[in-house]
Image (cartoon, helix red, strand yellow):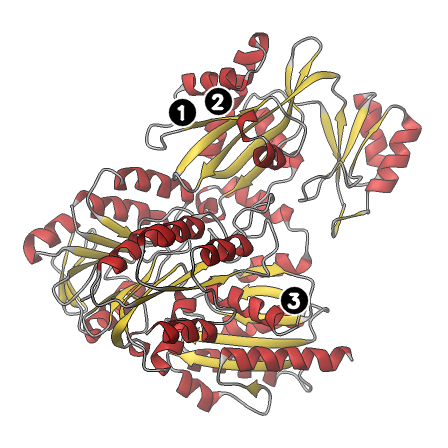
Amino acid sequence: MKLHEYQAKSIFADAGIPVPDSRLATTVEEALDAVDEIGYPAAIKAQVHVGGRGKAGGIEIATDREEAEEYAERILGMDLKGYTVEKVLVESGVDFVDELYVGVTMDRGEGEPVLMVSTEGGVDIEEVAAENPDAIAREHVDPAFGLHPYQARKVVYEAGVDADVALDVASILSTLYDLYEDSDASEIEVNPVMITSDRDVIAADAVMNVDEDALFRQPELAEMAEESYEDDLERKAGEYGFDYVRLSGNVGIIGNGAGLVMTTLDLVDYYGGKPANFLDIGGGAKADRVANALDMVFSDPNVDSVVFNIFGGITRGDEVAKGINEALEQFDEIPKKVVVRLAGTNAEEGMEILNTELVEVEETLEDAVQRAVANAEEVTQ
Amino acid sequence: MSIFVDDDTRVVVQGITGGEGKFHAEQMIEYGTNVVAGAVPGKGGQEAAGVPVYDTVDEAVEAEDADASVIFVPPAFAADAVFEALDTDLDLAVAITEGIPTQDMAKVNKRLSETDTRLLGPNCPGIITPGEAKLGILPGNIFADGNVGLVSRSGTLTYQVVDNLTERGIGQTTAIGIGGDPIIGTSFIDALEAFEADDETDAVVMCGEIGGEDEEEAAAFIGEHMDTPVAGFIAGRTAPPGKRMGHAGAIVSGSGTGTAESKIDALNDAGVPVGDTPEEVADHVESFL
């Protein structure tokens, strides 16, 4: 679960990490009120969950009120890589002489958190990692012990951070690790940490992603997650409790189990179609959950046809069939053609229950996908 | 022959009095698995699924000589249950639970490196040696005894591929779900190494998915250490970067690591054919036998 920059920064500030003075604005008027209070130069930063906001035109520095108005008007409401900008962070511009990268993430391969520091801040750190891996100093943390403060100092010195600010940077890193642990973060980073001409150290950006599986014990962060949904369908999926990812195609996909649903997406693509979404109803889904899944996919205006693929282990074919019937029988006319394939536990019982006047049925995954792709093509022609 | 579990495996079910635990304990027993006990704090002295329940795993092992556990404990308490299994020195612990916080698993992983217990999962369907034992939630009826080993990060994808094999009369020595989480116990390499050492396993299917580098590392292992032929499948070719595709571990990073393409290339380089469809995977396996 991704937090917005403004959310992460307020958490950082509460933990004692220095951040620039800032205000959140949702209208041009609010943005102008904010710059009046903060002064110039002021950064106007789009609050959307995409990387490279600066390059895409989502961050501008205003030096006077006229510019501030122009930028706020342009950025608020703009489309940034598919996301509509509804909020901007208006922030005091930092007069910096140097930029660093600091972060904490989970090293999956090692199964341990890792601290990362680089003097090549302010640029895409993943590019740095790919092109010049030695420019990033790393230090693994034993999750059973937690961070020893010396480790933060060690990795900062190892990265070659200027000696006069090294302890301040180490202190930020140490606080970030505490936040990482206390908030069940999956990733936390500041890029850049800015060093001013007065040799102050300031967190100029903030990335914080939280482990969704730990939200049950992070109630405050879970509330922030609610505010972070940017797509109505994703919000709906969150309410229904589905694993859902929206894509740009027109073949709606519902299935059980992440690997099999991904495979269904891949097969839609393989047979010449374009997947509209990933939707996993999870294990052991009952009829109402199945009906909710169909509601989700029907609500997506891009969807022209639907494939429903279930291989039951703990999910039972009869429950799935009941849910499909319930969902479809309420329509006078089925909005989009649905191809169903049931296999595994109680598949035969499911086939007997399934109202085949409302859906098309295929026996194999491959056939079901090809038919759904053909149905989608029919609609678009 | 088989790997990790067989007729002699004696199983304690952690969380046997819960809905899932009880249902699957019964299913395991019906399949012929030696389920000898349950372990649930506060429920010692009761009976569930026809076996005695103990308060601790330690007591269950003492009294019933169990050597493996299957864990059906809700996410908030699951890491604790895994620690309990590891600290009891079982041979095998299978964690079915999905949704254990990653930082809990990092601590488990640390403890795991200090014990001799094998951990399978979490977030996995379990393991089955057809006709002998099933530890987990896999639907027993789709499996058949045979000579193909299978290792997979996903449950239902495993069922799909097994179904394609069994339909053609190709049975399995052992099928293993290693789990879809970022931090797991048994890796592809651990399973591949065991299949390579197993005389009865004549071919292996490896089903991977996007995220992490386990498939790439497994490909290198296959290239260097395996004579048994391997067929592969990788799910998530169409997954966009930065999105978690259901499994906590199934995510292509923003910089493009963990992609299906990288995994398929690595497997092909190691001489492993990768099917475009599950049906094609079965074609490759058939050609090996």
User: Which dot marks residue A276?
Assistant: 3
- Graded by Cα atoms within 10 Å as few (under 14), some (14 to 19) or many (20 or more), the crowding at tag 2 reads many
User: Which dot marks residue A174?
Assistant: 2
Q: Chain of mark 3?
A: A
- What's under tag 1, amino acid-wise? Leu
**Tag in front: 2 or 3:** 3
Q: CA distance from mark 2 to mark 3?
A: 42 Å
Q: Secondary structure at mark 3?
A: loop
Q: Quadrant of the C terminus of chain A?
A: bottom right
- Graded by Cα atoms within 10 Å as few (under 14), some (14 to 19) or many (20 or more), the crowding at tag 3 reads many
Residue located 56% across and 60% down the image:
B237
N-term mark: 2 or 1: 1
Residue B167 to residue A90: above or below:
below
Question: Residue B94's quadrant in the figure?
Answer: bottom left
Q: Secondary structure at mark 2?
A: helix
- What's under tag 3, amino acid-wise? Ala
Q: Nearer the viewer, residue A21 or A312?
A: A312
Residue located 77% across and 41% down the image:
A56
Q: Chain of mark 2?
A: A
